[in-house]
Amino acid sequence: MKGKGGALDRRSSARWRLLLLCAFSFGLGMLFTNRFWTAPNTNNHIMSQHRRQDQELQLVSEDCNTKRKHGEHKDIMGEVTRTHEAIQLLDKSISTLQMELAAKRSTLELVRSGVPVTSETSQSRKKAFVVVGVNTAFSSRKRRDSVRDTWMPQGEKLLQLEEQKGIVIRFTIGHSATSNSILDKAIDAEDAQHHDFLRLDHVEGYHELSAKTKIFFSTAVGIWDADFFVKVDDDVHVNLGMLATTLARHKAKPRTYIGCMKSGPVLADKNLKYHEPEAWKFGEDGNKYFRHATGQIYAISKDLATYISINQPILHKYANEDVSLGSWFIGLEVNHIDERNMCCGTPPDCEWKGQAGNICVASFDWSCSGICKSVERLKDVHARCGEGDSSVWSDLI
């Protein structure tokens, strides 16, 4: 009995040891499981946070780079614009110096050849922004008075306009075929009253307008050192402030020719008003002229006026003055500026444009090549299409 009891005790002891070993193993397994299972979760959370921060930093960096590139692009475009403007100014300066040098050489050649040089040629020229030559005739006294009563200042205001704004306005006229005729004396008396004429060494005549245009530019460029020279007819309405503003936009450009550019038909029929005697030079019947500014009003820069002055003896004259001017610039590096606000119609056209904020430089009727019955109608056109007397005195000009 005692032997059996000892064996039973041993088996019980071994069973307990086994149970304790299992319990210890279970506890040890739980310990290791908690330690190594929770660690990866913490690391994953930290890694996720790092990834989000990296993405946010990348987005901020890309945004900064985009803004920096946009700023650099604006800086580059601004620099290109400034460089282009500087090149234009330099080109204009070189062109002007070349023309002035040629003019000096031309004057020197005249002196050497024994041709007398007038005081207007030899004296120092007056500075101005624009010289406006109003083309007129002996028979146009009433037209001149209508211009004086509307858009052309008189007396002290005319002088102030020259001194303060550099805007010179003169009626341009030559002389009659008969020396010291009654026509010439009438102009002398009118000039003594108004002091607003530029007398030209030219015999007046409708079919001599091309010659008169050459002489006007040559005479004016010898008296005034102006940026622009304008020719306008005495039956056209002009807003001087708008004219100055328009010209100022093109001041930096060299060799500038500004006006309403057109290309009308070459008229070979001798019975037509604007018949072209040299129509054969323009090719077949039905051909058109080259682009040129309409003759009612146009502007040219100083270097082109100087060019005309230097080459006056060899510049060909066509029947129509505006065609002649355009032909003188063919073959030259000239900037043709098509300014449509220099050829508005009379009311209601110019009136509607003014109400819309697009004030016209000049207004006339195409059907009359000027304002129809301008003596009677110019005041009404001025009242309805004028910019206001104070506009030309604006500080913006």
Image: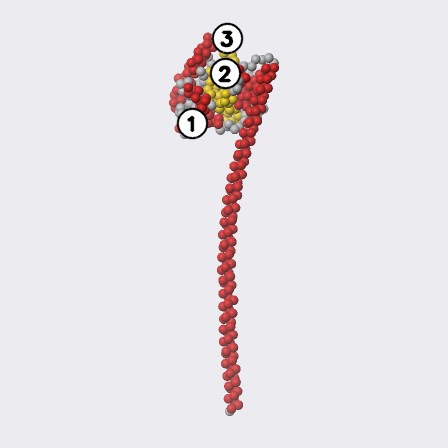
User: In the depicted view, which residue is nearer to us: 233 or 242?
Assistant: 242
Provide residue 159's location: percent of width, then percent of height. 44, 20
Q: In which quarter of the image is the C terminus?
A: top left
Percent x, y of residue 362: 45, 23
In the depicted structure, whether residue 324 falls above or below residue 82: above
- Identify the residue shown where x is 52% and y is 74%: 25
For the residues marked 1 and 3, what is the alpha-carbon distance in whole angstroms?
A: 44 Å
* Name of the residue lying farthest toward the bottom: 1
Q: Which of marks 3 and 2 is nearer the N terminus?
A: 3
Q: Distance between the residues labelled 2 and 1?
A: 42 Å
The image's colouring method is secondary structure
Q: Where is residue 361 in the image (x, y as percent from the top left)?
A: 45, 25
Which is nearer the N-term, disc 2 or disc 1?
A: 2
Res 46 visible: yes
- In depth, the one of 163 and 66 nearer the eye is 163
Residue at position x 50%, y 28% in the image: 250
Q: In this view, does 249 lie above or below 234?
A: below
Q: Residue at image x 55%, y 21%?
A: 306
Snapshot quadrant of residue 102: top right
Q: Which of marks 1 and 3 is nearer the N terminus?
A: 3
- Residue pointed to by mark 1: 394
Residue highlighted by disc 3: 179
- Give residue 273's mark: 2
Determine which of the numbered discs, if any, sits on residue 45 in the image: none
Q: Nearer the observer, disc 3 or disc 2?
A: 3
Q: In which quarter of the image is residue 390?
A: top left
**Spatial distance from mark 3 to mark 2, Cα to Cα?**
30 Å
- The crowding category of the residue bearing disc 1, from other C-alpha atoms within 10 Å (few below 14, some 14 to 19, many at least 20), is few
